[in-house]
Amino acid sequence: MSILRVDGERLWSSLMEMGTFGQTPGGGCRRLALTDEDRQARDRFCSWAKALGCSVTVDRIGNIFARREGTDSRAAPVMIGSHLDTVPTGGKFDGVLGVVSGIEVLRRLDELSIKTKAPVEVAVWTNEEGSRFSPMTLGSSVFAGDYGLEAGLGRTDGDGVTVADALARIGYAGKAPVGGREISAYLELHIEQGPLMKEGGEQIGVVNGSFNARYFVATVTGEPAHVGPTPMDMRRDALVAAAALTLEIDRIGRSRGREGRSNAPHLSLYPNVRGVIPGEVRLSCDVRHSDRTEMLAMEQELRDACVKVASERGVEISLEQYFEFGPIEFDPGMTAMVRETAKALELSHRDILTVAGHDAVPMNTICPTAMIFVPSESGISHNEAEYSTPQQCADGTDVLLNMVSKLAG
Ligand code: GLV
Ligand code: MN
Ligand code: MN
């Protein structure tokens, strides 16, 4: 079969265009899920899809599907997807590459007058980041049946706004049922978000599996009291205890070298005023490891740390798990196809595990799924400095195009 190539310049210019929605002074993006900036990015996606003659469907959790018909409209579609929402300190590539590369694949198929047998769809998933609404990968998880629709619509942001109301406000409360239909294959192109491929010099990451990750909320209950008169020995300060727990969490990850990770990135504090010793803190945290037994050992160390800090600081700490993923094994036939396609394109490649969650994780439970990484040139993500070169983005999209044309027949 002949090798197809995308238009790298057009891909880059569309990536940069998406980056204008919610652009930050340092060249990154702040485009939280279901905000006006997200609406602008969604609208641009829909206008690109319509210009290609695609039908555009929005489902009840706000996922968008641009569909290019195949010659057999009853055949299950091949789907390409990712997300357009970003974290508050986001860049131009995380998620966006997976969506914009999908549009570039459709454009190129049109240009080459390629008629596929199966339809090809490009999906934009709602709230992948979990920054505004928890949990992450919400739209794709509801689509895959891992999370209930009503539960998803009822999730609230920090101001108490529900997903349902936020969708209605930006005009993306769609009517299509969520999921429950056959997808023949799902492909997601993403930046690596870490330094391994940059260090190793490989051009394509064949994502064959994932780390094991468990996410918790630690609720630290102390006693609110006056900041001034309360003697130090009488305090039960929930924030001081949460700080001690944060250091323990950091230690647990560091003790595992590069195969382990631990995070405590989000904290809510009550009553969070200057005059009161904090009475309650909710700390979101997670532990991750490439090896499941080690991840479970890290969880046990986290539980032990909660007991130790609670007794040392005179507070109560309860730990509640709210999310997990892994171990994931992506479909071996699909990973083999990523390898073969990279080889045919003369792109160097390596197998790699994803450490972060992605929409491909829930999708992998309902259809053969492939994730393709391209290097993060800056080695950093969820940061304005996030960067992959035009060539790196085009390389990954070339792999996508050739796989889609093969899978869709
Ligand atoms: C965020 O991307 C995560 O993996 O938790
Ligand atoms: Mn992402
Ligand atoms: Mn992200």
Image (cartoon, rainbow, N blue to C red):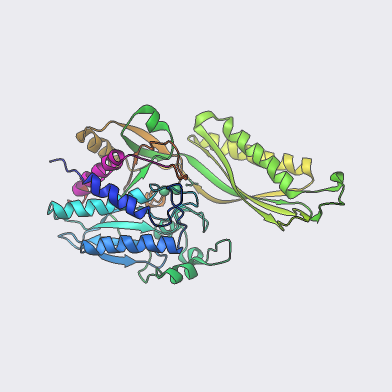
Q: Does the image show residue 181?
A: no
In the picture shown, does residue 135 fall above or below 373? Answer: below
The image quarter containing residue 76 is bottom left
In this picture, residue 283 sits left or right of residue 335? right
The residue drawn where x is 51% and y is 48% is 324
How far across and how far down the image is residue 171, in percent?
A: 40, 70
In this picture, residue 274 sits left or right of residue 23? right
Magenta-drawn stretch, dominant element (helix, strand or loop): helix
In this picture, residue 290 sits left or right of residue 341? right
The image quarter containing residue 276 is bottom right
In this picture, residue 363 sits left or right of residue 231? left
How far across and how far down the image is residue 333, in percent?
A: 28, 41
In the picture shown, does residue 35 fall above or below 243? Answer: below
The residue drawn where x is 34% and y is 64% is 43
**Please, which residue is most extreme toward the front here?**
25
How far across and how far down the image is residue 67, in percent?
A: 25, 61
Task: Decide which of 376, 233 is in the foreground and name it.
Answer: 376
Q: Does the image show residue 344?
A: yes
Quadrant position of the N terminus in the picture: top left
Give the residues drawn in magenta, as a range. 386-406
Task: Decide which of 164, 353 is in the foreground and name it.
Answer: 164
The residue drawn where x is 66% and y is 38% is 247
Instruction: Look at the image and say whether residue 215 sits in the magenta stretch.
Output: no
Q: How many marks?
A: 0
The residue drawn where x is 69% and y is 45% is 242
Instruction: Look at the image and say whether residue 396 sits in the magenta stretch.
Output: yes
How far across and how far down the image is residue 234, in percent?
A: 86, 47
The image quarter containing residue 177 is bottom left
Task: Decide which of 387, 283 is in the foreground and name it.
Answer: 387
In the picture shown, does residue 342 fall above or below 139? Answer: above
